[in-house]
Amino acid sequence: MENATPRRVEHQQTDRGYVPVYATGVVEQPWDSYSVTDHEVWNTLYRRQRELLPGRACAEFLEGVERFGMGENGIPKFADLNALLGKTTGWQIVAVEGLLPDEVFFDHLANRRFPVSWWIRKPDQLDYLSEPDLFHDLFGHVPLLLNPVFADYMQAYGRGGMKAFGIGPGALMNLTRLYWYTVEFGLINTPDGLRIYGAGIVSSKGESIYCLDSAAPNRIGFGLERVMNTRYRIDTYQQTYFVIDSFEQLFDATRPDFTPIYQRLAAKTPHAAGDVLESDRVFNVGTREGWATNADT
Ligand code: PHE
Ligand code: CO
């Protein structure tokens, strides 16, 4: 059988560039329609990351992978994962066609539903694809939803998203940067050293190595307004990774009402992705080796 493919509805210009937009509805995971190749892609990606991530990903992430019993037995059934997820933190995975409009995405998170693309990349896309697939969404994001603090943070982010959506595009951009530099590309400082918790990193072999081992990128202590005012790269590894001390720190920092912060930031020029500021708590000043010189998002 052909690999299962998603249904695109239209294309739309967004802050992430020109992206496909999919049917917004929740679908049933079409598990029976996955091909042998689809399952093999999962197994290959899973094995690669499972070997690479001990000593790189944070303990909470690795523990989540174990507790779900993810493995090399093909694409997991969402219903099986949902049984544990539901009774642990009350979250549910819902199957979707792909990237959702912002307000639909926020509504899911605010109701403790995490949208996961039901389709998986092709064998020639193991190292890079331009939009999130099942491996990124599921392996990258779902393990940490078993962590109570992170689970609450994600719901609060969804509620904050609804609010930012009502305020306007500037607020939405500031909030999207927070998601980017925490949920997708965050690092966490532990007694054993820096560890990964960002889904965009743990689902990428190349960036799982680069973000910790390369001297090129900056590694800078997390600051809420610092992050919300910093542009980012969508087409290359990150130029800067922001480091939290704990999930509690992240959740506490994001507790206040963002409305005055959005107002303040609207009057400021954003920092470039690779800037290092006087006020930064610096873990590593990047050598900037191999950095693209064209504009950030
Ligand atoms: N406190 C934020 C607000 O008032 C909401 C939020 C919480 C945003 C957690 C992101 C993460 O908008
Ligand atoms: Co993601």
Image: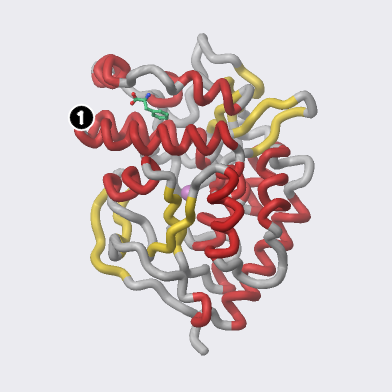
Q: Position of residue 272 (x, y in %)?
A: 41, 28
| Residue nearest the observer in this picture, 17 or 246 | 246
Q: Residue furthest top?
A: 279
Q: Is residue 124 left or right of residue 6?
A: right
Q: Position of residue 286 (x, y in %)?
A: 61, 28
Secondary structure of the residue carrying numbered label 1: helix
What's the residue at 61%, 48% (across, down)? 143
Q: Quadrant of residue 51?
A: bottom right
| Residue nearest the observer in this picture, 254 or 202 | 254
Q: Position of residue 224 (x, y in %)?
A: 45, 20
Label 1 near ligand 1 (CB < 8 Å): no
- Does 14 appear above or below 190? below
Decide: few, some or many residues near mark 1? Use Cα within 10 Å; few <14, some 14-19, many ≥20.
Answer: some
Inspect this view and state whether residue 59 appears: yes
Residue topped by disc 1:
167
Q: Amino acid at mark 1?
A: Ile
Q: Quadrant of residue 96?
A: bottom left
What's the residue at 45%, 25% (across, down)? 227
Q: Residue furthest front?
A: 87
